[in-house]
Amino acid sequence: MLRLKLPTDPRWVNIAEKNINEILTDHAYCEQKAASSAISFIIQYPEYPDLVDAMSALAIEEMEHFQMVMEQMKKRGCSLGRDRKDLYVGELRKFFKGGDRIRQMVDSLLLAAMIEARSCERFRVLSEGLQEEELKTFYGDLMKSEAMHYTMFLQFARKFGDGILDVDKKWEDFLEYEAVVIKKFGVKQEIHG
């Protein structure tokens, strides 16, 4: 379903498990950034009511996920550390060359779809590979949400890009690009790292 070209090395779960507090901190910030991104879509494209409605609901859901991650952290006696720059997302942004306002919106939707797709895939790895049952279930449940977000962003990209550009071709090229990018990651205690 995700069509990612390069799966995460299953051994990444060992890095994650040994550094679960770092993973949870990074995950919390990923959820916060996802909520902020949804709000940015509302601010930048208020004339599209269906997008505004979807992004409003998404912002709320992402902040609920943030709170859920914070609860996991509290159970483990850890607090939210400092945010780190997401180098993976920075590398993905380099794929896009700009353009008019609609093309920029489609690019942003495709970027969001890719982040959600990779997060979904990483959550699957965690849900299958972690030893702690509670976290396995936690990540299994979140994986399903990420999959729905991925498909929503991709559907919006296709809708708004229709007649303007070949969104499916661009997505396919982006999947190839992401496979090259992700080769540099998967060795750190970060969701995308």
Image: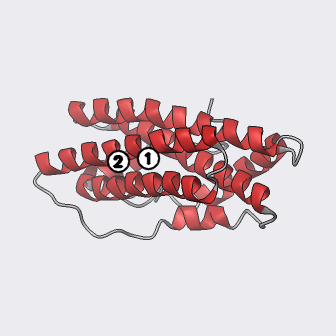
Q: Which is more toward the observer, 77 or 96?
A: 96
Q: Is residue 108 left or right of residue 191?
A: right
Q: Which residue is mark 2?
A: 63
Q: Indicate the position of residue 123 as horizontal and vertical percent values.
A: 42, 40
| Residue kind at label 1, given as amino acid type | Ala
Q: Indicate the position of residue 8 as horizontal and vertical percent values.
A: 52, 45
SS state under label 1:
helix
Q: Residue at 58% of width from left, 54% of height from top?
A: 41
The numbered disc on residue 59 is 1
Answer whether residue 86 is visible to the viewer in this image.
yes
Q: Residue at 61% of width from left, 45% of height from top?
A: 113
Q: Is residue 38 left or right of residue 162?
A: left
Mark 2 Cα-neighbour bin, 10 Å: few <14, some 14–19, many ≥20: some
Residues tagged 1 and 2 counted as in contact (Cβ below 8 A): yes
Q: Residue at 48% of width from left, 44% of height from top?
A: 56
Residue 44 sits in which quadrant? bottom right
Residue 129 sits in which quadrant? top left
Residue 92 higher or lower than 50, as above or below: below
Q: Is residue 32 left or right of residue 151?
A: left
| Residue kind at label 2, given as amino acid type | Met
